[in-house]
């Protein structure tokens, strides 16, 4: 196990050992979804005031609704959210990558 895997496993064990919110409902209590960038510098919980159980939070490169569509459909149509908060940010480096570039590098490196 790598050092990262060990750290994540340890943090997960610590979190789960004191977790007492398992009675929260599966659908978000405040019935909204946040779609934002996967930029590691953004903490959606702190940045947008999302409390545990309040909302679904979806993160991807550039906060792309198209890339998040399956999750959005499940959230809205099966779990009852009725509002989407789309949060993008200035200078998003994720938007500098084109799909064709990603497909190309995957083909080149992974076959």
Image (tube, grey):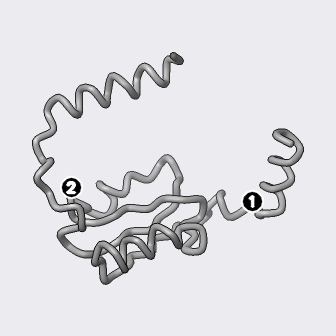
- Residue 75 lies, with reference to residue 19, above or below; the image says below
Q: Where is residue 92 in the image (x, y as percent from the top left)?
A: 61, 62
Residue at image x 47%, y 48%?
41
Element type where label 1 sits in the image: loop
Q: Where is residue 81 in the image (x, y as percent from the top left)?
A: 30, 77
The residue that mark 2 highlights is 52
The residue that mark 1 highlights is 97
Q: Toward the viewer: 66 or 47?
A: 66
Image quarter in which the C terminus is found: top right
Q: Toward the viewer: 54 or 110?
A: 110
In this rendering, position of residue 56 left or right of residue 39: left
Residue 80 sits in quarter: bottom left
In this rendering, position of residue 35 left or right of residue 81: right
Disc on the earlier residue, 1 or 2: 2
Residue at image x 38%, y 76%?
85
Residue placed furthest toward the bottom: 82
Mark 2 closeness class: few <14, some 14–19, many ≥20 residues within 10 Å: few
């Amino acid at each position: 196990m790598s050092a990262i895997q060990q750290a994540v496993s340890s943090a997960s064990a610590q979190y789960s050992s004191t977790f007492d919110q398992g009675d929260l409902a599966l659908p978000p209590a405040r019935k909204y979804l946040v779609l934002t960038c996967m930029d590691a510098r953004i903490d959606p919980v702190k940045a947008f005031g999302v409390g545990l159980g309040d909302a679904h939070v979806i993160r991807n490169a550039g906060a792309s609704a198209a890339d998040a569509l399956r999750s959005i459909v499940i959230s809205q149509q099966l779990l009852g959210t009725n509002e989407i908060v789309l949060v993008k940010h200035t200078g998003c480096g994720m938007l500098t990558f084109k799909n064709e570039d990603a497909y190309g590098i995957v083909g080149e490196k992974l076959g």
